[in-house]
Image: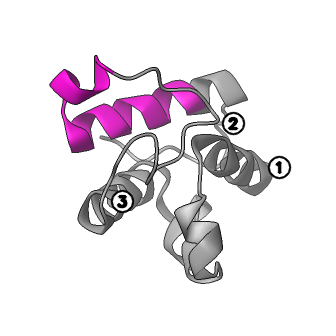
Amino acid sequence: MDTITTATKMNSEEIFNLMKQFITEVIGEEFVEEMDITPESSFTKDLEMDSIEIVSFSEKIKAHFGDQIDFTGWLSEMDLDQLINLNLGMIISYIETCQS
C-alpha cells in the first residue's frame, strides 16, 4: 500500500473504513464477517486481537501514513489499562489529530 502525503486529509469515515480494512487483513475476512466492527470496538475484547496482531495492525498504519502518524510512539505512552481498553474510535481520533 502506498504512503499518503501530508496534503491528503482523510475524514473519520474514510479512516474508519481504512482501519477496518487493516483489521480484516490482520485477523482474516472469515473472522471479520462474524463481527460488527464499530468505532467502539475494543481490540482486545471485541475483536479479540492478540499482541502480535496489534503489532501487525500498527505496521499497516505506519506503512500507509509513514511519518505523518507515530502510532507506535502514541501506543508506547499508554499504560496497561489504556492499551487493554483501546478501541477503534480512539485510533480514528488520534489520526484525525495528527492530520490537523
**Which element type, helix, strand or loop, lies under badge 2?**
loop
Q: Three-letter amino acid code at disc 1?
A: Ser
Which of pointers 1 and 2 lies earlier in the amino acid sequence?
2
Which of pointers 3 and 1 lies earlier in the amino acid sequence?
3
- Residue 33 covered by magenta stretch: yes
Q: CA distance from mark 3 to mark 1?
A: 25 Å
Q: Three-letter amino acid code at disc 2?
A: Lys
Of the pair 95 and 4, the residue shown nearer to us: 95
Asked if residue 69 is positioned above or below residue 1 in the image, the reply reads below
**Which element type, helix, strand or loop, lies under badge 1?**
loop
Of the pair 29 and 8, the residue shown nearer to us: 29
Quick check: 76 left or right of 3?
A: right
Name the residue tied to disc 2. 9
Q: CA distance from mark 1 to mark 2?
A: 8 Å
Is the residue under label 2 in contact with that under label 1 (CB below 8 Å)? yes
Of the pair 93 and 83, the residue shown nearer to us: 83
Magenta-colored span: 16-34
Residue 31 in the image, given as x and y percentages of width and height: 23, 28
Asked if residue 34 is positioned above or below residue 71 in the image, the reply reads above
Query: Which label is found at residue 70?
Result: none
